[in-house]
Amino acid sequence: MTRRGWLLFLAMGVIWGVPYAMIAVAVDDFDPVFVAFGRTLIGGLLLLPVALYTDALRPVLQRWRPLLLYTLVEISGPWLFIGYAETTLNSSTVGLLIAAVPLIAVLIVTRLGHETIDARRILGLIVGFAGVAALVGLDVDLSAPAAIGAIALTTIGYAVGPIVINRQLADLPPMGVVTASLLLAAVLYLPFAVLRRPTYFAADAALSVLGLAIVCTAAAFLLFFALIGEVGPARATVITYINPAVAIVLGVTLLDEPLTAGMAIGFPLVVLGSFLGTRRPGITEPRDELAPAAPT
């Protein structure tokens, strides 16, 4: 990987590790659906001029059915579910639980027959899910099953999203896919966001929503496309393994969240399991269907 590639890789690892802390701050004052609406609307509007200038939207809109499916499983559902979960769970725990996305992706593509599951992958799944179990069993209040269920649905959505891209949208301009999906998600959120709109815009929460939209959505996707062009789509999505570490650091240092035994045990197990479960022997880059693309 070139120096530029490493810089883009590290930047993306940080940028997509930051949202968990920002979401935690935003949902203290705003309803989760309003946070998701503000992020998608502002992010989509920021990317819209680029998409229009490059004529990237027209071919995407002609394939609206898979675009709608991708939007639901990769953006609309997950960003709402994460916000809801963070009203109960701390941001570090949410970030670590979502690190299980590659493990879910392995199960899905194996079930679909795209890949076979061998002893190494079985070991990866066992190790990774042991890490998730450590997080849930040691850190998560099991009296809040709805929050745990929301994160479970998020991980499934993030695992399905790349499969939809590979099967239905891979030949379309990425800028068009992302811009259209963000704006479509904003439209889906709109009626609920109006009903849940805040009566008072707290400065911290408002700045967090702006940060999510500008840094973690619009700028992040532009950098991510540059990273894909530099190192390829499979290597680019390995940033998923870095994001949880960033989420832990920010949660502990900025939000005064505890560094718990579950995190200390679960984090290395989840990352090791994801690496073993998605890495193909003798091949540098995993197949795109296993790419754990999870823009948070």
Image (cartoon, helix red, strand yellow):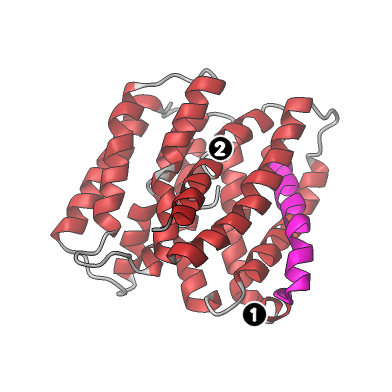
Left or right: residue 136 compared with residue 53: left
Residue 95 shows in the view: yes
Whole-percent x, y for residue 41 in the image: 76, 53
Residue 48 vs 85, above or below: the answer is below
Q: Quadrant where the N terminus lies?
A: bottom left
Whole-percent x, y for residue 119 in the image: 14, 59
Give the SS element for disc 1: loop
Residues tagged 1 and 2 counted as in contact (Cβ below 8 A): no
Identify the residue shown where x is 63% and y is 75%: 65
- Closer to the camera, 246 or 67? 246
Identify the residue shown where x is 73% and y is 60%: 47
Left or right: residue 186 compared with residue 228: right
Residue 75 vs 149, above or below: the answer is below
Q: Give the label on residue 18, or none.
A: 2
Q: Which residues are magenta?
A: 33-57
- Main SS category, magenta section: helix
- Closer to the camera, 205 or 7? 7
